[in-house]
Structure formats: structure tokens, C-alpha cells
Image (tube, rainbow, N blue to C red):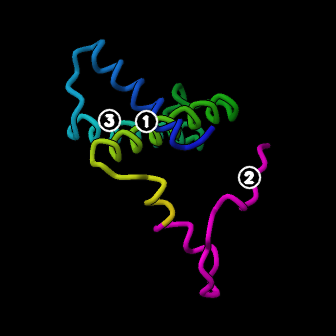
Amino acid sequence: MEFSHLQALVIKIVEQYCAQFNIPLDATYAQLKLYEEVGEFTQAVLRRQGLARPEKRSDPETAKTAIAAELTDIIGMAILNAHLLGIDLEEAFARKWFDKLDRSGAAMDSYTDLPVVNKK
């Protein structure tokens, strides 16, 4: 899936959710939701590491599933925040991350020739 398509889907889903539950879709909502999701991610990690009350702890596979879900929520809320702030995340990644790939000083023309990360 292209990143721009993912962004469009996330925005559409959030807009539908906010309309359904009569929630104002603004920067305050987006920022607070991002904080909430980071907290839920932290909680899932604590459960996986056995740093929660015994009844809250999770087996490794359940914990991995919960952590993955919270990471996707964080990414979704980051996409929403960028959208509301008028930030092009593809461009921001190119400036912040991708230019660091070649430390020799050679400019990187494109990130399309990068290897695909293998899924396990």
C-alpha cells in the first residue's frame, strides 16, 4: 500500500468515527488521542515485560498482538496530527530520515530503490 493511500484511509476512518460519535475533529482531539495511544502502548509493553500486576500480565503472543495494535493506533494518530497541521509526512520523512542513509555526502535521489524489510 502506498503511504499516501494509507494516510487517506486513516483520515477517512477518523472523520467517520468523529461524525458518528459527535466528536469535534480538531488539533486538541488529535493531540490528546496521540497521548492516549502512547499510554496504551506503554501499558501493553509493561504487561509483556511482566511489570504489571499479575492479573494484568499477558503471554508473549497476546502481548505482541496488543503492542502491534497500539503501534498502529500511534501511527494513525500521528497521521491525523500531521493532516490537521498541514504536514506532508512523506516529505518530512525524506528530510528527517532518508537523507541520513548515505553518510558519505552523496545525495539520495529516491527511496524507491531501498530494500523491502522482510516480514517474519
Question: Which circle marks residue 33 in the picture?
Answer: 3
- Percent x, y for residue 16? 35, 18
Residue 73 is at least partly visible in this image: yes
Q: Is residue 119 magenta?
A: yes
Question: Which numbered disc, 3 or 2, marks the residue closer to the eye?
Answer: 2
Q: Which mark is residue 117?
A: 2
- Looking at the image, is mark 1 or mark 2 nearer the viewer? 2
Tell me the quadrant of the picture where the N terminus can be found. Answer: top right
**How many residues crowd around disc 1 within 10 Å: few (fewer than 14), some, or many (20 or more)?**
some
The residue that disc 1 covers is 40
**Residue in view at x 53 percent, y 25 percent:** 55
The Cα–Cα distance between marks 1 and 2, rounded to whole angstroms, is 26 Å
Specify the amino acid type for callout 1: Glu
The region drawn magenta spans 95-120
Task: Please rate how many residues cluster around mark 3, counting C-alpha atoms within 10 Å: few if below 14, some from 14 to 19, many from 20.
Answer: some
Quarter occupied by the C terminus: top right
Residue in the image at 21% along x and 35% along y: 26
* 3D distance between C-alphas at marks 3 and 1: 10 Å
Residue lying at the far bottom of the rendered structure: 104
Q: Is residue 89 left or right of residue 69?
A: left
* Identity, as a three-letter code, of the amino acid under mark 3: Lys
- Based on the displayed image, in which of its 4 quarters is residue 24 positioned? top left
Q: Amino acid at mark 2?
A: Val
